Image (spheres, rainbow, N blue to C red):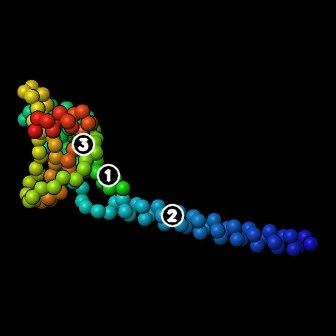
Amino acid sequence: MSLRGILGDCSTRLEANMKRNTLAIAVATLTILCVAVVTHAGPSVRKTKLTFSHTVEVPGAILPGGSTYVFKLLNIAGGRHLVQVTNEAQNKVVALFQTIPDYSRRATGHTVVEFGELSVGSAVPIKAWFYPGERIGYRFVYPKQKAVRIASTS
């Protein structure tokens, strides 16, 4: 085989590889753009400012009464619903925990928070949070031992 034949064959393979790589890059870019659109698509931000008169508990944190907290729903790809609790200025995360869907018979025009019951002197656990105008809310997921204690006193 002549040098021209070898160079021509290499050139053809190089062009084929470049086309394949360009296609792979285009597909990867399109996939990233689609994921970004899916991540940002969906309902508006669910955020509520709450001030409690008594000490309350959320999974992983005790919230002293008298302070204002911001509860915000974080929609994560894969259908997981996380609630982030921050201070009023929203510059310090107090808690971040998973929730499961909870259902109400009717929607109200205001935020609804369901509380559990515990013995006198301990923090009252928050069981669920419903955003205004929605029948589907967010049931807080506590560690098993804590959940059993909350369920037995309710």
* 80 relative to 33, above or below: above
- Can residue 51 be spotted in the picture? no
Q: Callout 3: 10 Å neighbours few (<14), some, many (20+)?
A: some
Residue type at mark 3 is: Val
Residue type at mark 1 is: Arg
Place of residue 92 in the rendered image (x, y in percent of width and height, measured from the top left): 27, 37
Place of residue 16 in the rendered image (x, y in percent of width and height, measured from the top left): 70, 71
- Which residue is more in the foreground, 32 or 89? 32
**Direction from residue 3 to residue 20 in the image, left or right:** left
Which residue does the numbered mark 1 point to in the structure image? Answer: 80
Q: Quadrant of residue 147?
A: top left
The mark closer to the camera, 2 or 1, is 1
Which residue does the numbered mark 2 point to in the structure image? Answer: 29
- Can residue 12 be spotted in the picture? yes
Which residue does the numbered mark 3 point to in the structure image? Answer: 141
Q: Give the CA distance from mark 3 to mark 1.
A: 12 Å
